[in-house]
Each structure stands twice: as structure tokens, then as C-alpha cells.
Image (spheres, rainbow, N blue to C red):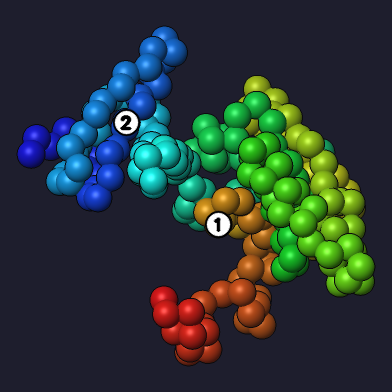
């Protein structure tokens, strides 16, 4: 196996296609064997396309980049927040900002937001808790564009909900980004931080 840029992906059991988007919008296609190791090359984004065969029908699954990592940033006097460049690369030109379930804010890219809405639309509207959830998530959602410095504006109502003053902790949480007031995130009674054995017991219940 040849190692280039230390970007290696293991795969087995299915055909794997690798698409590489370069700056000139050129697309390269690679067809790999059914099992083994592969090294990704180049400086653009890589997407893994898994092609599976079920009863002579093709099923295509695309695995997107996920939001990971933690950043300490802040908002200015005009309530503008710089979204980390690593996140902006995936978000594109705009994003959705809304209230989180916890005392934080959520940022979604457009595709993941639309997928979330599809799931929400399947929930039973007759359930009052579902209706409250829809109001919380959808009723407070705003579309945000980025300025030249990569900033978005946090509306006053969302800022107040998250108890944001100035300093922030911005966390990649797979399909979404969480924005916390630093004081809230560091608070000793913050139940969302993995500081107790209770988290281990909860994860064990899910065989994790």
C-alpha cells in the first residue's frame, strides 16, 4: 500500500467509488477492489460512495463529512460570530441557526436541515410534546448567510435563550454544530459534559 498525506481508509465487502473535487471542479473517479486499504490523495474534498447490490438492484450510500472538533470563539458588539473555517467549508454559503434542545444553539447545513424537517414531518402532530418540539426547533429557525469574514449574526432572541454574553464554545456534533455560552458550558452543573460515570452506564445500555 502506498501512503500519501497519511489519509488512509479501510473498506471491505462492497465496491467503493472515490470522487475527488478539485479547485477547477474536475471530478476523478476511482474504482477499488472489494476489500483492502486505500490511500486518498490530493488537496480537495473526498467523498466515499458505497455501492451495494441487493437482489440485482443498486443501492448507493454517500457518507458526508461530519462536524467534529471544539473551538473557542466569541461574538462582537453587533452579535456577529465567526464560524470556524473548517465548518464553513461544509456549510457552504448559508446555514440554519436555531434553538438547541439543551441551553445552546444549533447550526445545520441546508441538506441536513431539510433531512431533519422530513423526519419531523413524520412525527404524530396529535402529540402535544411533538407540537412543542416543532415550535421550539422550527419556530426559532433563521437562515444565515456568511459575510466576507465568515461571520453570521445571532438574533437577540437566540442569544438570550443561550445566555450568550461574549465568549463561546463551538462544538462539532456530527450532523450539526452546537454553540454554547462559555460560562454555560463550563458551569459545574452542566449535565451535557461527560464528567460522570452515569454517561458510561448510559452508553453501555446502547452497546457502545
Task: Give the image quarter of residue 2.
Answer: top left
Of residues 7 and 178, the one nearer the viewer is 7
Of residues 147 and 140, the one nearer the viewer is 140
Position of the C terminus, as image quadrant, is bottom left
Q: Which mark is residue 173?
A: 1
Q: Image height check: is 112 above or below 94? A: below
> What residue does disc 2 label?
18
Q: If you read the primary sequence from the N terminus, does the residue marked by circle 2 or circle 1 appear first?
A: 2
What residue sits 84% from the left and 64% below the top? Answer: 124
x and y, in percent, of residue 167 in the image: 67, 55
Q: Which mark is residue 65?
A: none
Q: Image height check: is 28 above or below 77? A: above
Please say if the residues under marks 2 and 1 sit with CB atoms less than 8 Å apart: no
Separation of marks 2 and 1 at Cα, in angstroms: 25 Å
Is 184 on the left-hand or right-hand side of 10?
right
x and y, in percent, of residue 57 in the image: 42, 39
What residue sits 48% from the left and 79% below the top? Answer: 206
x and y, in percent, of residue 13 in the image: 24, 50
x and y, in percent, of residue 10 in the image: 22, 48
Q: Residue furthest front?
A: 55
Amino acid at each position: 500500500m502506498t501512503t500519501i498525506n497519511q489519509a488512509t481508509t479501510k473498506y471491505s465487502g462492497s465496491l467503493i467509488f472515490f470522487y475527488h473535487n478539485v479547485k477547477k471542479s474536475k471530478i476523478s473517479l476511482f474504482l477499488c477492489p472489494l476489500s483492502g486499504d486505500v490511500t486518498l490523495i490530493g488537496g480537495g474534498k473526498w467523498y466515499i460512495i458505497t455501492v451495494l447490490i441487493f437482489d440485482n438492484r443498486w443501492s448507493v450510500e454517500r457518507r458526508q463529512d461530519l462536524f467534529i472538533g471544539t473551538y473557542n470563539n466569541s461574538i462582537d458588539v453587533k452579535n456577529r460570530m465567526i464560524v470556524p473555517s473548517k465548518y464553513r467549508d461544509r456549510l457552504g454559503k448559508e446555514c440554519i441557526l436555531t434553538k438547541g434542545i439543551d441551553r445552546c444553539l444549533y447550526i445545520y447545513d441546508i441538506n441536513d436541515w431539510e433531512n431533519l424537517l422530513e423526519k419531523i414531518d413524520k412525527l404524530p402532530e396529535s402529540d402535544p410534546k411533538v407540537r412543542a418540539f416543532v415550535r421550539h426547533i422550527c419556530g426559532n429557525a433563521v437562515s444565515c448567510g456568511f459575510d466576507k469574514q465568515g461571520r453570521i449574526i445571532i438574533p437577540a432572541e437566540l442569544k438570550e435563550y443561550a445566555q450568550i454574553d461574549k465568549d463561546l464554545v463551538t462544538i462539532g456534533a456530527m450532523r450539526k454544530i452546537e454553540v454554547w455560552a462559555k460560562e454555560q458550558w463550563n458551569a459545574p452543573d452542566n449535565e451535557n459534559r461527560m464528567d460522570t460515570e452515569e454517561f458510561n452506564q448510559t452508553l453501555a445500555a446502547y452497546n457502545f
